[in-house]
Image (cartoon, grey):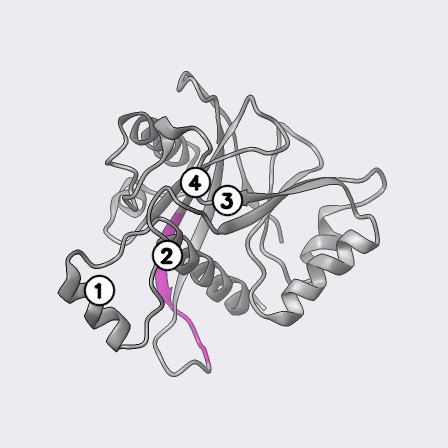
């Protein structure tokens, strides 16, 4: 189950890379990508894929009910009942999320996309370095992650880390920074090597003055 969750995190990261539009530069690179069978990514700023779902649990529901469905769930100490779920991987995981919704496990829920609706936070870089304001919020989130002990400085700074900043559709006073840290290979039946990734969700004040909370993966 753990391996499936981690592989699912990587699949979500792949979707983000496409949504951020970080395609190979130049016509030759693009042609090569198409020739190898890769889909053309969405041009940056034009569209954005869903990177997760944020929700408040209904009264009487628990995080365990969501985790039991095989979903990767982050919970927040400062916000009891608030959960962030990584994109479902496969038909069964998608069905699990639909089942939870039909059972009214959530009081409210909404999709979280790879890009913010704020143009000053739109970024085409995996580390958000091409947007000064987004980069500042990303650095704020990464520093908080290290200070909390959720990950080390080398982990959040290493090549391959994918960072996104999104709107919180349930609370406009917050932004959602998702940092995906590259892990080790996992057992998989896929014909290519599957690398695990650790997903860390940070809720930040859009002004950049503070971190609201850091999500913890629920077991």
Residue beneath label 3, please? Answer: 113
Question: Pointer 3: residues within 10 angstroms few (<14), some, or many (20+)?
Answer: many
* Residue at x 26% of width, y 57% of height: 23
Q: Is residue 118 above or below residue 185?
A: above
Give left or right: position of 214 versus 65: left
Kindly identify which residue carries mark 4.
Answer: 115
Residue 158, x across and y down, in percent: 25, 48
Chain-order first, disc 4 or disc 2? 2
Mark 2 to mark 3 CA distance (whole Å): 12 Å
Specify whether residue 184 is in view: yes
Is 26 rendered above or below residue 136?
Answer: below
Circles 3 and 4: CB distance less than 8 Å?
Answer: yes
Could you tell which of marks 1 and 3 lies nearer the N-terminus? Answer: 1
Q: Along the horizontal axis of the image, is 159 left or right of 92?
A: left
Q: Which residue is mark 1?
A: 30
Residue beneath the point at 43% across and 80% down: 190
The N terminus: image quadrant: bottom right
Separation (CA) of disc 2 from disc 1: 13 Å
- First to last magenta residue range: 180-188
Q: On screen, 52 above or below 97?
A: above
> Where residue 105 appears, x then y in whole percent?
79, 48
């Amino acid at each position: 189950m753990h391996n499936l969750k981690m592989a699912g995190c990587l699949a979500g990261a792949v979707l983000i890379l496409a949504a951020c539009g970080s395609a190979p530069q130049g016509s030759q690179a693009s042609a090569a990508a198409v020739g190898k069978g890769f889909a053309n990514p969405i041009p940056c700023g034009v569209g954005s894929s869903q990177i997760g779902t944020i929700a408040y649990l209904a009264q009487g529901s628990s995080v365990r009910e969501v985790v039991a469905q095989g979903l990767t769930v982050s919970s927040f100490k400062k916000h009891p009942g608030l959960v962030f779920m990584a994109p479902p991987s496969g038909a069964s995981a998608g069905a699990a999320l639909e089942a939870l919704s039909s059972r009214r496990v959530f009081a409210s829920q909404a999709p979280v996309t790879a890009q913010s609706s704020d143009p000053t936070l739109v970024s085409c870089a995996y580390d958000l370095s091409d947007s000064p304001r987004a980069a500042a919020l990303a650095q704020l989130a990464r520093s908080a992650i290290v200070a909390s002990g959720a990950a080390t400085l080398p982990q959040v700074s290493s090549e391959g880390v994918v960072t996104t900043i999104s709107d919180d559709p349930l609370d406009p006073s917050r932004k959602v920074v998702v940092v995906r840290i590259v892990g080790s290979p996992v057992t998989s039946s896929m014909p290519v090597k599957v690398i695990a990734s650790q997903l860390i969700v940070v809720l930040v004040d859009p002004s950049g003055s503070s971190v609201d909370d850091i999500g913890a993966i629920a077991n």
